[in-house]
Amino acid sequence: MKNISKYLSGTLLGLSIATASGTSIAESYVTIGTGGQTGTYYVVGQTVCRFVNNLKDIDLKCNAPSTGGSVANVNGIRSGDLDLGVAQSDVGFNALSGLKQFDTKFNNLRSVFSMHGEPLTIVARTDSNISNFSDLKNKKVNVGNPGSGQRATMETLMTFKGLDFDYFSLASELTSTEQSSALSDKNIDAFTIVTGHPSGLIQEATTVSDAKIIPVEGNDIDQLIKKYPYYAKTVIPGGLYKGNPNDINTYGVVATIVTDKDTPNDSIYAITKAVFSNLDRIKKIHPAFANLTAEKMISDGLSAPLHEGAKRYYKERGWIK
């Protein structure tokens, strides 16, 4: 791996290499960038590592630390600080194309598989009198910390609408873990997040505050989706959160696992196999994973080309040619 000084490809083939002293070297490591500890990205990384670390035929060890989110993960992969990362499909597209948050193209970015859908979710305190997006004008809104996927999505949306963050009286940059308390303390009127549902963070926010999710819809959103096909309309089901009994229309992206082209094929093959061999178990770990299917995971939201290691596994399964 890029962040490990020595990588022994023989290890990933289930071989043990003996040193002159007779000691066996048989362990390699991967690090997966995630997000805030209360968010779904953290669960994704921990879940993947759980099954990788249980592999019997290969001594590959995995850890998934909390990070700043999608953009930070892609940059970490590019710099070699991370081997893989969870990233929104739009952030992956921007990285590959050298757009928005990325000054240059990340040509080596590769997809492994996708996970859950992630609607753009805007949560507002009921007493802030916010019912739709236009009501956010001159309000205190948390747009997300730099490097997070929610910040990237908001920047794209605001630019498409011909607006900037001056539209709000305050555009705070709190991390996802800080948003609920800021809302209940009335330091902000609303916050944005891009996440799978149900979300523990939003459950917390709607429990400690009288808060509601507002729709993000309209002709401009239709045009946005038409221009950027990695977005799609979606519905946040009613009844998931206290005080939010009705379905909410919005749009969103897909959480994807990405890596570098040069991450060893055997490592990515092993990680991919670990996930799909345990997919039925993974679907029970978090409600956002409940509707995962292999068919969608190898196609939806994959902005970058498939990594050769993942491709090898999918060909073995007969899923791609």
Image: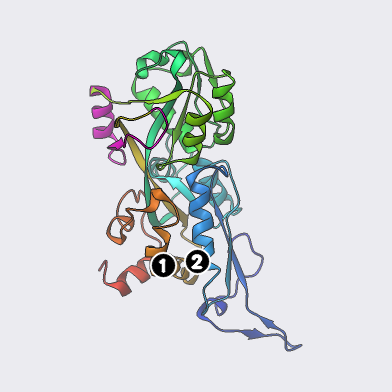
- Among all residues in the image, which is located at the extreme right? 21
Provide the secondary structure element on which disc 2 rests.
helix
Which image quarter holds the N terminus?
Answer: bottom right
> 164 above or below 280?
above
> 10 above or below 186?
below
Give the amino acid type for the residue marked by disc 2 in the picture.
Answer: Phe
- Along the line of sight, the residue nearer the viewer: 174 or 87: 174
User: Is residue 229 magenta-colored?
Assistant: yes
Provide the secondary structure element on which disc 1 rests.
loop
Give the amino acid type for the residue marked by disc 1 in the picture.
Answer: Asn
> 129 above or below 101?
above
Q: Are marks 1 and 2 in contact (CB under 8 Å)?
A: yes
User: Is residue 202 magenta-colored?
Assistant: no
- Along the line of sight, the residue nearer the viewer: 135 or 203: 203
The image quadrant that residue 198 belongs to is: top left
| Image location (x, y in percent) of residue 115 | 39, 52
- Along the line of sight, the residue nearer the viewer: 20 or 146: 146
- Along the line of sight, the residue nearer the viewer: 217 or 285: 285
Which image quarter holds the C terminus?
Answer: bottom left
Residue position marked by numbered label 1 in the rendering? 278
| Image location (x, y in percent) of residue 267 | 50, 69
Range covered by the magenta-colored residues:
219-243
Residue position marked by numbered label 2 in the rendering? 51
